[in-house]
Amino acid sequence: MGKLLAFLRQNSVEILFIALQILCLSVLVQTKSFHQSRWNQVAGNLTNRVLDIRSNVENYLSLKEQNNVLQRENARLRSLVPEMFVLDAAVYFPLKTEDMEQRYRVFPGKAINRSFKKANNAILIDKGEKHGVYSGMAVIGPKGAVGIVKDVFPRYSTALALIHSNMRLSVRLKSNNFFGTLTWDGRDFRFAQITDLPTHADIEIGDTVVTDSRSTIFPPGITVGVVDGIEFNTVGDFIHAQIHLSTDFSSLHAVYLVDDVRKDEVEAIMDETLNFNNQ
Amino acid sequence: MKSSLNILTSFILGILLQVLVLNNVQLFGFMVPYYYPVIILALPATMNQHYVLILAALTGFVVDIFEHTGALHASATLIMAYLRPVILRLISTQSGRELPELSLKALGAKNFLLFSTIGVLVHHFSLFFVDALRLSNIDITIMRSLYSTLLSVVVIFLVHGLLTPLKKNV
């Protein structure tokens, strides 16, 4: 008995090593045979929380890249919505998908600088001539219309915002087709006005206002804002409507540039018509 | 008291570095850097071997929990810890036995490199060998352990070197 104890004491390190090793190997064998062991579930709860934090950090660090990827995808998807196509058939029936021709193409961009407190507000966009931007392109944001490209530089361009005193945008009510012109009175960057709606127009607070097809710049049907207040102007028989703009110009970042494939054609016709009128 | 606090700190930091950063690294598909063996290797030479073994099993097991590998790392770290006195005798620094810590600073660059390389090699070989018993061939196992040892030693040298800067005269 004494000898056994002495032996154990002498080789205690080896015995501990072998005992621990046997424990390890038995755990190892058991994990392999029971794929979803109880232990995995218990330990998983704990470690998953730590790994979740790690994944959050990773996500945060790759946010910029993921945003770019998503914005490109959005631009592609936006190019595919029906508003971006026009029917290009001489006879309208029967309808065929081949007759739908893409008129508007959407490209991603970033508003790298913007003003919203001035009377004439502009947006600086990080895409320019090099990327195919031209003066007169429509600029839309994630929530709705933003503005129109004015000056184009090799790598950058500036756009007039909807909240610019010179901005005139053809809009209509989404529910019925009463149309008007959107302007900005220079007061609050959240609100623009329609001043030329006829008094018989069927308009209510909460109606959505979208871009009209009379606009040769914007694709029709792009959201502009929501009617926030209505005032009857007795002098000119017009309704004065206050529009709450969908785009928040104080937090604008991602924008989309809309390329009108038929722009030259439409502009040539407009020029001719105007000349004809002048004669 | 101070030294046990140091050991606890290096234990926590080393394991966090391992599971949060290094486990995500996979160079060329098969080279995985393991930093955590140095936690055990750098324990004081005078420390009771029983404690070293228990701490080694514990360290390996925590890594196992994060990697869902049962007790694979625990087993490999245990073997390394068991052979640690032998490795220490191999590099034959008599002073090494009395050193409070077998760090880069205490051992000097050359001895520490030798010590950690042998230790990590033992650890990696047993790790990949036990892992491969049910996976693949021995030549791949040897190759994997050699290449991973290279990577691990580089990581250990960099991180450990940053934590404990070299003395000027070394």
Image (cartoon, coloured by chain):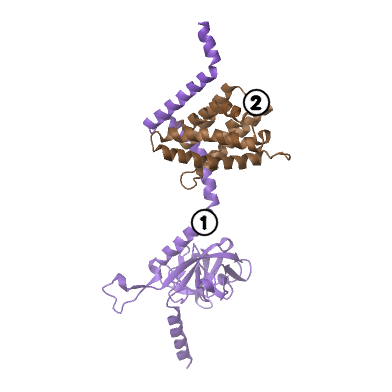
Chain colours: A purple, B brown
Depth check, front residue: A263 or B10: B10
Whether residue A15 is visible, yes or no, is yes
Question: Residue B146 appears at what percent x and percent y?
Answer: 50, 40
Secondary-structure class at tag 1: helix
Residue at the limit of the structure toward the left, as seen here? A94
Q: Residue at x 50, y 47 (%)?
A: B27
Verify CB contact (< 8 Å) between mark 1 and mark 2.
Answer: no
- Looking at the image, which is closer to me, B131 or A80? B131
Q: Quadrant of the N terminus of chain B?
A: top right
Q: Which residue is mark 2?
A: B97
Q: Which residue is mark 1?
A: A65
| Direction right: furthest residue | B169
Number of marks drawn: 2
Above or below for A16 versus A1: below
- Across and down, in percent, residue B50 comes to 56, 21
Horizontally, residue A163 falls left or right of residue A45, namely right
Between marks 1 and 2 in the image, the one whose residue lies nearer the viewer: 2
The quadrant holding residue B105 is top right
Amino acid on which the number 1 mark rests in the picture: Glu
Q: Chain of mark 1?
A: A
Q: Nearer the viewer, residue A84 or A244?
A: A84
Q: Position of residue A112 (x, y in %)?
A: 58, 64
Above/below status of A39 relative to A77 = above
